[in-house]
């Protein structure tokens, strides 16, 4: 095939990606690719955690998590425009087939922001070090991990803007593979310590960034392009995300890490981190789905087909949430065998923590695959501020009162309270602000909450799944008409849009 033929084929594929029909016709293929790559991400993440926790112990692994937590907290100060790149990148791509103006507009905000933040690192690092019990030698590791992840996230959101989800998924899987291989090499040569292990989490994102920029070379002009209108749009879209990011920090596991470090110890931080990572990997599935749904919503808005969005949120979302909740309970049940077997009896308590954390996944699902893409599509990011406030208050006070009394289980329930508060806030605001029908999305989370609470009370899987099944059957009977509408929307999406 000649260079001209390759270029023509690439242009044809690019033109197809500019339509909403591409999103729908490739939805299964794109999502299945993301699922497969996420399984690879999960596998190599688990392999890395297992290798570190078994070699270094829970305390050594807790040290690695402390560095990554410090870096992730620092990301709050520079990542607030990431979603703006994805949102307006899609809009630009649908119109022109490129994301150049959006990419450079976000770069113009992101790069000085990052450099200024690094320049003040001597001011903010001691505070984080005190909170997370970090030694002085972790300083440069935190900065390097922060910088590598900040640029890698920039490239990932550019992929979303250009509707390249499969490429993003593949590179994320390769990143986790490289992390595991570096850790394995360090172990083989007898050089694996918690400090050297952090380098395994720094170098792969740098390599993936370089590969990603090469893949974007035909979608981004490497001659600087500044578009005042897009710059203003990204700023207007992203400014409400500044308080959202800062306040939202108080609803994350990084705040949990600080509370656990203060009230408990690094061993328990390592145990909690294992359960949280499993739940985090579980959460990646709706997060990935949301990353596909947001471009679809923006494309539908650009082509005046917004009515489908209302049908999706009202009719399809409840049954999807229910099915997701069933999967969450199955994951929690599997963790009882999986966690002690893979990570060792030392961290067996993580399986009980996981039973609580999956409830937060059930509450988060509808937001990730419905309401957050809706908010992004309408550029109503200010809704994120009350969501963040509700979640932050619930998490902060939940941790403050529950950890001293209930330990790690209390910390997990604080996470559930935070996620539930955020979900209820966006549910109420969205149905008040937009012409959306309120069906049974909230009720569809109840089976998971009841099942997990039942298990923690009885410690019996038989009783848990009996109660779980009864609640689901009653819910389906109560909402049988809406269930038919939900299935109809999901099965006939392309027909509805045609």
Image (spheres, grey):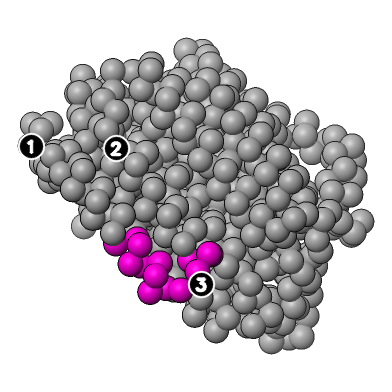
Measure how far apart labels 2 and 3 are at the Cα level.
29 Å
Can residue 177 be seen here? Answer: no
Of callouts 1 and 2, which one flags the residue occurring earlier in the amino acid sequence?
2
Badge 1: how crowded within 10 Å, few (<14), some, or many (20+)? few
What residue is at 65 percent from the left and 25 percent from the top? Answer: 243
Does residue 458 belong to the magenta stretch?
A: yes
Image location (x, y in percent) of residue 267: 77, 69
Asked whether the residues under the numbered discs 1 and 2 touch, taking CB atoms below 8 Å apart as contact, a structural biologist would say no
Q: Quadrant of residue 185?
A: bottom right
Most foreground residue, 417 or 95: 417
Most foreground residue, 456 or 292: 456
User: Which quarter of the rendered picture does the C terminus lie within?
Assistant: top left
Seen in the image, is 188 located left or right of residue 422? Answer: right
The residue tagged 3 is: 459
Say what secondary structure mark 3 lies in.
Answer: loop
Of callouts 2 and 3, which one flags the residue occurring earlier in the amino acid sequence?
2
Numbered range of the magenta stretch: 455-469
The residue tagged 2 is: 440
What residue is at 51 percent from the left and 75 percent from the top? Answer: 336
What main secondary structure does the magenta stretch of the protein show? Answer: helix
Badge 3: how crowded within 10 Å, few (<14), some, or many (20+)? few
The residue tagged 1 is: 495
What residue is at 43 percent from the left and 55 percent from the top? Answer: 450
Seen in the image, is 384 located left or right of residue 304? Answer: right
Measure how far apart labels 1 and 3 are at the Cα level.
47 Å
User: Which quarter of the rendered picture does the N terminus lie within?
Assistant: bottom left
Instruction: For marks 1 and 3, give the one nearer the viewer.
Output: 3
Badge 2: how crowded within 10 Å, few (<14), some, or many (20+)? many
Does residue 282 belong to the magenta stretch?
A: no
């Amino acid at each position: 095939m000649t260079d001209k033929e390759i270029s023509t084929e690439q242009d044809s594929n690019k033109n197809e990606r500019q339509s909403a029909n591409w999103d729908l016709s490739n939805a299964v293929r794109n999502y299945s690719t993301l699922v497969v790559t996420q399984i690879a991400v999960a596998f190599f993440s688990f392999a890395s955690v297992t290798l570190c926790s078994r070699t270094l112990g829970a305390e050594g692994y807790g040290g690695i998590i402390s560095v990554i937590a410090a870096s992730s907290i620092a990301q709050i100060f520079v990542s607030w425009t990431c979603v703006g790149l994805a949102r307006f990148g899609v809009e630009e791509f649908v119109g022109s087939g490129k994301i150049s103006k959006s990419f450079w507009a976000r770069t113009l905000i992101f790069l000085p922001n990052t450099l200024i933040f690094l320049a003040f690192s001597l001011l903010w690092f001691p505070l984080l070090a005190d909170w997370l019990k970090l030694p002085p030698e972790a300083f440069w590791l935190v900065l390097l991990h922060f910088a590598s992840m900040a640029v890698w996230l920039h490239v990932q959101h550019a992929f979303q803007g250009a509707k390249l989800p499969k490429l993003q998924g593949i590179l994320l899987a390769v990143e986790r593979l490289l992390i595991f291989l570096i850790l394995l090499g360090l172990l083989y040569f007898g050089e694996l310590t918690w400090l050297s292990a952090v380098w395994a989490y720094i170098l792969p994102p740098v390599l993936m960034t370089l590969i990603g920029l090469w893949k974007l070379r035909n979608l981004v002009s490497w001659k600087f392009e500044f578009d005042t209108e897009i710059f203003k749009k990204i700023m207007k879209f992203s400014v409400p995300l500044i308080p959202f990011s800062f306040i939202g920090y108080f609803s994350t596991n990084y705040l949990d890490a600080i509370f656990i470090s203060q009230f408990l110890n690094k061993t328990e931080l390592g145990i909690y981190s294992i359960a949280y990572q499993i739940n985090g990997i579980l959460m990646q599935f709706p997060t990935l789905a949301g990353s596909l749904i947001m471009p679809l919503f923006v494309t539908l808005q650009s082509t005046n087909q917004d009515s489908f969005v209302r049908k999706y949120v009202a009719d399809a979302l409840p049954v999807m949430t229910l099915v997701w909740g069933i999967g969450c309970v199955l994951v929690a049940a599997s963790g009882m065998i999986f966690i002690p077997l893979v990570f060792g009896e030392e961290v067996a308590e993580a399986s009980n923590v996981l039973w609580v954390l999956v409830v937060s996944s059930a509450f988060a699902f509808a937001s990730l695959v419905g309401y957050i893409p809706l908010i992004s599509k309408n550029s109503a990011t200010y809704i994120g501020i009350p969501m963040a406030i509700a979640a932050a208050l619930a998490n902060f006070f939940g941790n403050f009162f529950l950890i001293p009394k209930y330990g790690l289980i209390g910390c997990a329930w604080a996470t559930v309270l935070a996620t539930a508060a955020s979900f209820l806030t966006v549910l109420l605001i969205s149905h008040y602000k937009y012409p959306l029908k309120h069906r049974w999305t909230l009720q569809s989370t109840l089976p998971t909450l009841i099942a997990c609470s039942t298990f923690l009370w009885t410690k019996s899987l038989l009783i848990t799944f009996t109660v779980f099944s009864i609640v689901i059957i009653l819910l389906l009977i109560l909402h049988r008409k809406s269930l038919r509408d939900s299935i109809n929307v999901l099965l006939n999406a392309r027909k509805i849009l045609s």
